[in-house]
Amino acid sequence: MITLGIESSCDETAIAIINDKHEILAHQLITQYKEHSIYGGVVPEIASRAHLEYMDVLLKQVLVDAKISASDIDVFCAGVGPGLIGGLIVGANMAKSLAFALNKPFIPVNHLEAHSLMPMFFNPELKFPYLLLLASGGHTQILIVHDVGNYELLGTTIDDACGECFDKVAKMLGWDYMGGKDIETFAKNGNPTAFDFPRPLLHSKDLNFSFSGLKTAVRQTIEKIGDNMTNETKADICASFQSAVCEIIEKKIKSAIKQIKNLNIKHLVVSGGVARNFAIRTVLNNIANKNGMKLFVAEPKYCSDNGVMIAFAGEQNFLHGKKSDFTITPRPRWPLEELKND
């Protein structure tokens, strides 16, 4: 079976073609960095227009790369939420049009589920159920993944997402709006104890996250330092900030493992853009090892938004009996725990 997936939920335009042997036949992605960088963040209307501009180009290229025609594709998929509504409409309409014209099924994909299942594409030994930390620019959640379309939410962020916090701190330090990677790079040369940043909700009994207070503390520190900021000070801020995030995640995941110990879950998964952070992956790997579990992560370049994850999630939903649905409309919000009812 050959599946095509389209991702257009934010500022990445991507199309991928995969087969049911977990092989990537083609994948093309355009990051809209140049369109948004001058504004310091993603502008929804500009993102939508960029998706329209790039979509046809990417479609033609993936067909060439895969050495097939559109009629050879068995299932067409697109992310239909959550995300920026304009971009979702562009991707969904493209996939629907192709599927309708070729009399093939169209499978709508939940963007969060695509992230959640992506590590399975590279690790066939990963089995349900597993404990998942979903951490991205828009979401930070702890879930039990029972099966495709069956998610149990254990904890979520009550304000900012982890990835959003990374990017905003990077912007405070003068870097690009997608500067999470810069924080990780600078943190390697910094002192993680130089600044005593808060760990919000660290000792709460629930599994929820809060990053707003941490972000505010970093901003106040940067404002206090002012013109005396040096690269060494930046490195210390990055290391201290990253250490605080790691400690928060460590405490919440340890608590989650205790909470689900009677379920005998042996696999821990981290997915989403934040999964690219080596320090966070190291913390989670240590936790997994100490608790008789194994950590699974997608290949780094497929942790961020991409077309492969949409194609794979669509394929898995199709194989699990999900029916073609041309009537579904894109939605800016679509919680994972609603999928079972859907």
Image (cartoon, rainbow, N blue to C red):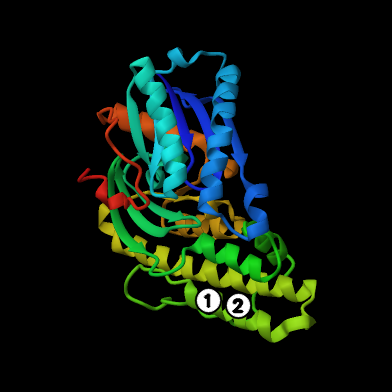
Place of residue 242 in the rendered image (x, y in percent of width and height, measured from the top left)? 60, 68
Tell whether 81 sits left or right of 196: left
Q: Quadrant of residue 106?
A: top left
Q: Quadrant of residue 192?
A: bottom right
Q: Quadrant of residue 98?
A: top left
Tell whether 157 sits left or right of 56: left
Say which residue label 2 marks: 218
Q: Is residue 47 above or below residue 24?
A: below
For label 1, the crowd category at 10 Å Cα-Cα, with few meaning under 14, some 14 to 19 and many 20 or more, is some
Name the residue located 36 percent from the left edge and 77 percent from the top edge: 204
> In the image shown, does 101 or 76 lie closer to the viewer?
101
Name the residue located 27 percent from the left edge and 34 percent from the top edge: 327
Whether residue 123 is visible to the viewer of this picture, yes or no, is no
As helix, strand or loop, the secondary structure at mark 1 comes to: helix
Q: Is residue 177 above or below residue 273?
A: below
Place of residue 4 in the rendered image (x, y in percent of width and height, measured from the top left)? 45, 26
Tell whether 278 sits left or right of 158: right
As helix, strand or loop, the secondary structure at mark 2 comes to: helix
Place of residue 149 in the rendered image (x, y in percent of width and height, measured from the top left)? 28, 42
The reply to whether discs 1 and 2 touch (Cβ–Cβ < 8 Å) is: yes
Say which residue label 1 marks: 214
